[in-house]
Amino acid sequence: MNAFATLLPVIFPIIAGIGLLPVKFKDRKDREKWVLSIVVLNALFALYAIWGVGGAYVTLFRFSEKLSLGFHIDGLSKVFGTMVSLLWIITTVYAFEYMTHEGKEDKFFAFFIMTFGVVLGIAFSGNFLTMYLFYEFLTLATLPLVMHAMDNKARHAGKTYILYMMFGASLAFIGFVFIYCYGSTTDFVTGGVLNPALVAGHEELLRMVFVMAFFGFGVKAAVFPFYRWLPKASVAPTPVTALLHAVAVVKSGIFAIIRLTYYSFGTSFLIGTWAQNVMLIIAAITIVFGSTVALRTPHIKRRFAYSTVSNLSYIIFGVAIMTPAGLAAGLLHMVCHAVIKITLFFTAGAILYKTHREYLYEVEGFAKYMPITFATMAITGIGLVGIPPFAGFNSKWALATAAVESGNAMAYFGIAALIISALLTALYIFYIIVRAYFPRKREYPAGYYDHVSDPNGYMTVPLVLLAIVSVVIALFPDTLLHIMQNAVLGIL
Amino acid sequence: MEVFQNSMLPILAFFPMLGAVVGYGIGRSNKKARDIWAWILAALTFAGSLTLIGKESVYSLPGFCGLGISFAADGFGVVLAVLTGAIWLLTTLFSKEYMADERNRNRYYFFVFLTLGATMGIFLSADLFTTLIFFEIMSFTSFVLVIHEESEISIRSAQTYLAVAVIGGLVTLMGLFMMYHMAGTLDMNELSVFIQAQPDRKPLYVVGILILFGFGAKAGLFPLHIWLPGAYTVAPAPSSALLSCLLTKTGVFGVIVVSCKLFLHDAVWGSMILILGLITMVMGAVLAVFSVNLKRTLACSSMSQIGFMIIAIGMQGLLGDHNALAAAGTFLHFINHSLLKLVLFLCAGVVFMNLRELDLNKVRGFGKDKPLLKIIFLTGLFGIAGVPLFNGYISKTLIHESIVEYIAVLAAAGQSTAFMRFAEGLFLFSGGLTLAYMTKLFVAVFLEENPYTVARKKTGPYMSGLTAAVLVIGAVVLPVLGLLPHATQDVLAEMGRGFMNAHAPEHAVHYFAWVNLKGAVISIVVGAVVYFLFIRKALMAKDANGNMVYVDRWPEWFNIEDKIYRPVLLVCLPYIGGFAARLAGSLTDGFIAILRMVIFNDDNGRVVPPEDKYFSAYTDGETDKTVYREGFARSLLMIGIGLAIAMVYILN
């Protein structure tokens, strides 16, 4: 029974998605009914599997002694799975309305549902092979979503996307092979699975492999210099950019890095070595780099995409500190950033949906006509900068504290990056918000404000809900941080 | 005194914010009811602050916002809370008439009361984390007050304000973070104990300066004063009054906390603060003398007066155990300046709501036939210029006495007194300038004839009974405080003493003894000389019609904001950053592009810029104009194969 409950949220949406592929809904209401019930049902399955069953290791299929398809829900899976499930429901509602303007909704929602299962597969996987498998599936399942529009731009983005992913996966695969050879098992075990007897004498080689695998998974997490697919993929429909390219896909990459670092190679093998320093430095570079480019990007969605690049590396920075506190802080930032960035993308999507404006100099003065959209953008935007008492402040504070406590000299480098990036974030976010609320000109050409109004409840309700969540997280972060700490320590 | 848990403290911070939301709701349907609600809200907050009098209260909300926030109100906090409540009530009453013709009034009231809550939160905070949270809220909410008019100039000024506030806030946050890491607490009193116990203070000074940065920026301390003149000038008069009386004072509050709690009796820190204060004081006064804009002069005056307070704070550090006079001077000038600037900015508001002009040449002669306004303004003038019998005289005397005292201390110790004598000279000189620029305003607005007519934009009397009442109440306080210093000001000074860890004075100060009056007389003489010989001669000229008018002689090139900050922040740094980022970003693409041009050499070698305004040169039907093509796929595959071979080799 436990096995079934664990597998159900992974398999059900994949089957449902495949089943939906040939279906042509005649009526929008029909489609909404079906899609929403599948998503909500599966979210319930997932939450039940996470909080109701939990724990047991489920082997689906065994290839050899060390290789199997296995699932195991531990603390980390719980955090990631819960976050994804809840956000998936909200995004689905938003997508119903948004996708009317993109068209081809049947195909879209089929893949969208499939992706849900695949992401949960990554969250629940109990060993490296299973995770690797779902990791590849994720690329394939999301490719049609990225290329949804099927114009030149989208095809180009899709091509870039798949090339980067293939490249990353090939590097990650090397990591897998080495874990297979040098590990006592390929399961995820807190503290790592490397077999000291086998490792002896090959430490440097293994660290080299770790760095390669880090970059491999890092491609999905958009670390410098493999970030380029992410801004390009912002041609995808906004729900995809918001949920997949700010939460599910990119954070799967981070999730895999966490598995790789803490559960396969083990922090004791890496801490204080050059491999850790590479991680820290790459994270610091990406943090500043992403913010700098974001500041120079006038396209709103791409600006947010670069901001994602930067923020993902905040999490990686937390992971790279390689202490429980660092990982907990990273996870906290993962949740805060998920809520914030999904809201920001939703607001950008709302603007795009209502007015077809994409550049920030085209939205001056819109706040008056789209009050809900821009109010939520302002609340979460201030949070993104990390200004107390808004969401995002506490995670950054926790990150910096963890960095200092680790005593690693490189960590100070990262703190400097955090601060520089905070300033840059302030600049690139406030630029949009201030201009939207306070336009530079009194008069704009005729037709400038045409169709500028808040979208309907399908889009505003998710926005308001997410903004409220972000404020609640900001005011009472302790509960969340405790959950993260427990997850890290394996007692959740 | 008994200390007890008092939930009034968080209520004072959060109730106005809640009320702001309610008021916004009311204002959407009924504007009259909203105005009345605003009065009720301000009155309730004021009443709430009054309940704090006479007791020492604390309150903490652990876990809130992560680190938890805590409030405390000893005498110092109580006085500031009452002051905030009173000034807010008066400006809210004043707003009714002033804002009658303005747009976006609902937004205005909403943010005014958010700001009220945040200001209360700052003044009542017991730890620096709480201070910072409310400080940040206040920065954002007051930004909306500054930008209220949404004219080009106000947007620019407000952006400067926001930029300074955000950067300052983040730097302070960094300082607090480092402090928290060192001390493990941000509670002001615990930090004080912690720092006293540190033998080596060098790293602490760095942290202290970081913390000071944000507060100093808010206080308008040189060289972060750039936002101040612009923001005060463009904000609506009630907001200018609030900015000058209270919001800027939150910065001074922060400086007091850092100097009197963290670096208590620290001479090194004190001298740094003193020097910053001296520069700010002189700079503000000089700017004010040159200004030809009514509110701008008052704004620069605020900057200068804050310099006086900062000097007093610095003197507290230098005097160490004998800092009673400096501490009293700090606190009293803090209060007196707030009361004075309330009156002066509201007077300026009356002028503006009638004429919609602030240029001295335009508002000239406005008050010639308005005796009530004239007397009220004159009271403010005497107060701020430190004329005996008015409140400003008392606090300036105390600050002056503290400098004199320190000179005596230095002389007794056989050390050089040259610098302190120079500081005293600057102090008296700036006092003179205060009188000079205030006289300039008074003469222009209330005594001179305007050779040109400026149409009144307002119908009805030049101010309503309510507005007049507000002004009279504000103005009556000033001479009362000045005439009865021992009964009023000394009491206030004593209430503030505990917070600043100051000692009781050894003897009562004889404010009206000749030795103390001498400083005021010197300042007044300096002021008269500057006014008649410099302002009337050098800063006025004949215009085309032969009339004497005020001219702006401030050199164009001497503007730190336009010549240094803006170019560096908006042009140089983004350019360098963008260039570096693009260079780095081109690494992946550029490498492939070069390979394609050199090794694969397949076509014309055209390279499309990786990220520009148009993202990439897409045109329908053409697919071969992008950098990535089969070449990229091939090279990736090659890499993959190469890595696989390497792996196989390693494994064997």
Image: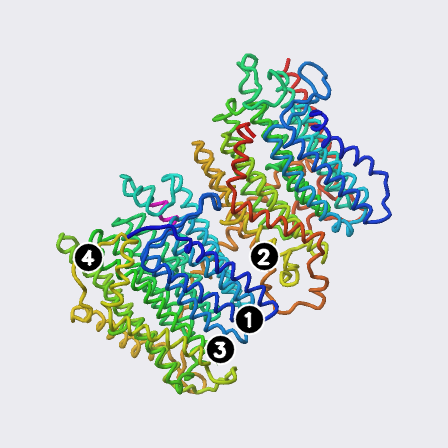
Q: Alpha-carbon distance for marks 3 and 4?
A: 47 Å
Secondary element type, mark 4: helix
* Residue marked by disc 1: B33
Going from N to C along the chain, the mark reached first, 1 or 4, is 1
Relative horizontal placement of residue A385, taking residue B197 as reference (left or right): right
Pinpoint the chain carrying mark 2: A
Q: Which residues, given as a range, are shown in magenta?
A: B205-212
- The image quarter containing residue A337 is top right
Pinpoint the chain carrying mark 1: B
- In depth, the one of B170 and B50 nearer the eye is B50
Q: Alpha-carbon distance for marks 1 and 4?
A: 56 Å
- Counting from the top left corner in percent of width and height, residue A196 is at 54, 15
Specify whether residue B206 is painted magenta. Answer: yes
Secondary element type, mark 1: helix
Q: Mark on residue A433? A: 2
* Residue marked by disc 4: B406
Q: Are marks 3 and 4 in contact (CB under 8 Å)?
A: no
Task: Examine the rendering and report whether any part of residue B197 can be seen.
Answer: yes
Q: Alpha-carbon distance for marks 3 and 2?
A: 30 Å
